[in-house]
Amino acid sequence: KMIVSIFILTLAVHLSKGAAIQEDEVFCEINPLVYTNSPLVIPNGGNTFLYPQHGETTLRIPAGQTVDLVCPGSVLVVLGSRAQESVSATCISNIRFRILGERTLFTQVSCAGDAVAITRFTGATCESGGRVGEIGFSLTDSRFLRIILVCYDTVAQSPLYTYFDMTASIGNNAKGTPRPLFGQDNEFYNLGSRTVNQLYTRAVQRQTVNTLIGLSTTDLTFIDNGSWFFFARGHLTARADFFYPAQQNATFRYTNAAPQWQTFNGLKWNEIEGSTRSYASRNAVDLQVWTGIHGVTTLPHQTTGAQIPIYLFTDNGNRALPAPAIYWKVVYEPISRRGVALIGVNNPYDTTVASNLICPDVSSSLNWLTWNRLNITQGYSYACTVANLRRAVPYAPNLQVSGLLV
């Protein structure tokens, strides 16, 4: 099942870091972010990622050790000549490696193009009748660099939750990576002649939502033309949660997104994501992070007053791409086995939210979150124990938790 896969992946990440390098040992020391098109550096024959140690910006590789330099979906450029998608590189010293039989500086190796991520089904199943998918890079038929695990609801055509490992080195991650367009993996969607991108456009989502709640298709009451009141493509796993530009770009798959009010997406949820990264960096801990959705948000019908569930796709009674009622994030530190569930309400118009919490609020026990959590427009937010979240959301992770992550 999915939890077993997560354990194996996490173990591989920890093993890939290796033992500390002795001071008198000869090693290569490279800046893996020296260029935006630098290749990914991964263990030789492996499918995990190497990161600098906490507080450092360079990777240290012992002399004689071999790593792989990869450009998923593109090709390497070595000393000005194009090579294959992946090459082995053996450390000599400093930034010198032996690549394709030649002594080569790491700075003389680049990728010809951007890494290309995909989402694929693994063949496994997950909670609530979902199917397991994984977002990442396909190197060969048998070698896949996984970035994010997805539990996917094929009926709603929406992720139920995502999972990834956050490195303690996240504070030194790539900054300012250009935002790519979101990509659609067609195996995951059945939307007739529409694409997911079309359904998210302001005009189409306004038409869809207004039709559901009895407004004219051009009415601006809920979906306006400003910068805040519309449904954004809300990342479950954020791009800034990753270290390398290629990993960050891989988050731009619709299988890692759900309709999220921009007032919430750009404000309170963004603060929750940033606080989680700061916790990992400040405490020098690797974190396991699940991010999911629950329920379907509603808006009042303008004639009957009934609360109507909101979807971005409707067709002859079929509905897909639900706008979640809440977003939740479980943050877990596996060494101490401490964890917490962070929750935000995805509805800037719901004034009853404070009386409808899905689990008892423990946010007063947390001092590492920076949030104005009671602001409804920005996304009313609170925190719960992991166990109490799971009582309300049965597909939330079932973890052995020793206490609250404080």
Image (cartoon, helix red, strand yellow):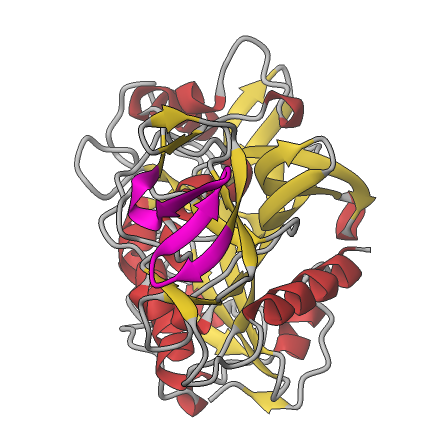
Give coordinates of residue 4: x percent, y percent.
79, 62
The part of the image, by quadrant, that contains residue 292 is bottom right
Q: Which residues are magenta?
A: 90-109
Q: Report the residue that reaches farthest toward the left.
A: 226
Judge left or right: residue 188 versus residue 237.
right
**Going 60% across and 45% down the picture, which residue do you hit?**
145
**Going 63% across and 15% down the picture, which residue do you hit?**
316
Closer to us: 173 or 21: 21
Check if residue 95 falls in the magenta segment: yes
The part of the image, by quadrant, that contains residue 179 is top left
Give coordinates of residue 405: x percent, y percent.
51, 85
Q: Report the residue that reaches farthest toward the top.
A: 193
Closer to us: 29 or 72: 29
Give coordinates of residue 82: x percent, y percent.
41, 24
The dominant secondary structure in magenta is: strand
Question: Is 37 above or below relative to 368?
Answer: above
Question: Is 5 above or below relative to 228?
Answer: below
**Going 30% across and 26% down the picture, which residue do you hit?**
202
Number of dots carrying numbers: 0
The part of the image, by quadrant, that contains residue 153 is top right
Give coordinates of residue 226: x percent, y percent.
17, 36
Asked whether residue 191 is in view, the answer is yes
Check if residue 294 falls in the magenta segment: no
Judge left or right: residue 331 versus residue 246.
right
Closer to us: 151 or 303: 151
Asked whether residue 392 is in view, the answer is no
**Going 75% across and 62% down the picture, which residue do you hit?**
3
Q: Quadrant of the N terminus?
A: bottom right
